[in-house]
Image (cartoon, rainbow, N blue to C red):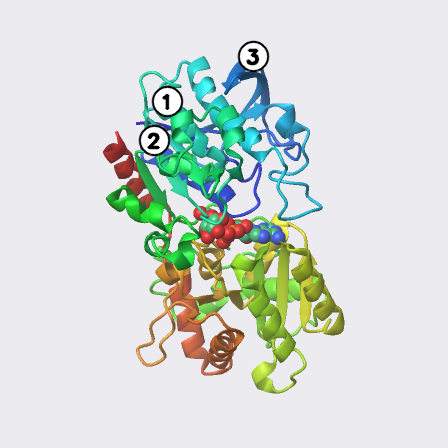
Amino acid sequence: MNVLHVASEVAPFSKTGGLGDVASALPKAQAQLGAQVTVVSALYGSIQATALGLAKRLRTFDVPVGDTTYKVGLFEGSLPGSGPRVPIYFIDHPLFSERPGIYGPPDRPGEDYPDSALRFALLSRAALTLAQELDWRPQVVHGHDWQTAMALYYTKMGALEPVPATVMTVHNLLFKGLCSLETAQKLGVQPEHLSLSGVEFYGQAALIKAGLMFADRVTTVSPNYAREIRTAEFGYGLEGVMQSLGSKLSGILNGADYERWSPWLDPYLPARYGAAPTSTEQLSDADWATLMAGKARCKSELQRELGLPQRLKTPLLATISRLTDQKGIDLIIDFLEQELPETGERSDFQYAIIGVGDPAFEQRLKMLASRYPARLAVRLGYDEALSHRVEAGADFFIMPSRFEPCGLNQLYSMRYGTLPIVRAIGGLLDTVVDYDPRSRSGTGFAFSSYDSVALLSAVRRALATYHGDAGSFISLQRRAMRADFSWSSSAKAYLSIYQQAI
Ligand code: ADP
Ligand code: GLC
């Protein structure tokens, strides 16, 4: 099976969130199952081509977008990791290379470059021209989110011969790729597709619809989110489209790339700990404690790095996130405002937050951190290495999302023995099992309603378990670390969607 993935971010070359991780891990997992996979993305100004082992290809080629032709260059590399080589190509054009950010100016988070529609139409179209140039015939073109939805549209309109099947994955329905209908037409959307049954959305064009309406199959990143986006609460105006897709729409849970996210392999940690789940099943508590010794070291080093008092017994909560409405940052701030002034044992915790996003959230968090420096550490910015150290050093990971298509940090947290405290929606509901002390089951803590009281009560339950009998906490941690969200079964599910699409 020949598969062409087109994605706007691919870790470790470019990443603002989970899409980057998935666009790297899924192709690798598919290659391991025997598929011939190629990935195409863009060479943004922030990508250090030489340091990342990318080779410049001397060829340039012409890419038609609507009536305009763009001359693009090409860089080639491989996705890092063991297993069969997966080639990745980067389209080189000033629209990418002369921009420091992936989606918008780095100093203005949340803001898109005004010509985003054109930039990503160019990436989408260039990926198809590249396949032709390489004389490589994909049987499936797989686009991710609105940025590469046009690749599926161009494919349907005959950009490649023979016409491959098309699959669109929705990672986040909030982002629709809005532009004027005139722009959409300039990008090559045919006049008859500028209507509601095409890309039209409330008088504008939503480029995500170029994928939703024209791809052979549409997937999203968890079964629960696939249900939710058929409702007004989570559909953000596209619930009708989602309902109309019927069985063409399904949810496939994201996996975790355990080569990059396992505490016994992680090169970013001051000490490694844990071991592959299969080798720890029968371990006695004493042997388990020895295996986990590194986690305490990670915690203490993290406290030092963040300027928090190095107190091992104080529970350390953490959040690593884009600081946006989606992620429930307002709940975290309400919770902190209420709890940081408290002094009793029930409220004794430290909290580390790593994130970048909405300036209003950034400012409120900074202010709280300066008022309570011994309890709250806030690092504003994107820091991959620190994000691994936080996953390892924290005791609990908080994700009170308003909506969450899948979420990856709860998966990473479980593997690092850092118990997730999540809102039970989207992919969080599909992946975290609420702790039940009576049946001694569960892998974390979940709450339902979107308010800070519900979050507080989940945190209280978590802290009580932490301070309670050590056996319960350790067995909860062991269950979380054993939970298996490796990519292989999801990668198989995608291959079977491809078969259906073909
Ligand atoms: P989303 O894609 O909605 O942002 P996910 O949970 O799927 O949410 O993925 C987020 C990914 O981005 C994780 O790998 C997380 O560690 C990473 N991440 C988010 N913010 C930062 C940051 N400030 N620094 C480093 N990594 C971050
Ligand atoms: C999106 C979603 C997140 C998901 C990620 C990867 O950014 O917000 O929930 O895990 O994509 O699919």
Question: Is 180 situated above or below 365?
Answer: above
**What residue would you read off at disc 1?**
157
The residues tagged by marks 3 and 1 sit, at their Cα atoms, a distance apart of 26 Å
**What residue would you read off at disc 3?**
59
The quarter of the rendered structure image containing the C terminus is top left
Find residue 375 and report its horizontal and vertical position in percent.
68, 73
Q: Point out the frontmost of discs 3 and 2.
A: 2
Q: Residue at x 58, y 66 (%)?
A: 330
Seen in the image, is 129 located left or right of residue 35?
right
Question: Is 43 situated above or below 331?
Answer: above
Q: Which label number is shown at residue 166?
A: 2
| Amino acid type of the residue tagged 2 in the rendering | Thr
Q: Point out the frontmost of discs 3 and 1.
A: 1
- Of the residues under marks 3 and 2, which one precedes in the sequence? 3
Find residue 355 and report its horizontal and vertical position in percent.
63, 56
Seen in the image, is 166 located left or right of residue 204?
left
- Of the residues under marks 1 and 2, which one precedes in the sequence? 1
Find residue 59 and report its horizontal and vertical position in percent.
56, 12
Find residue 216 and report its horizontal and vertical position in percent.
30, 34
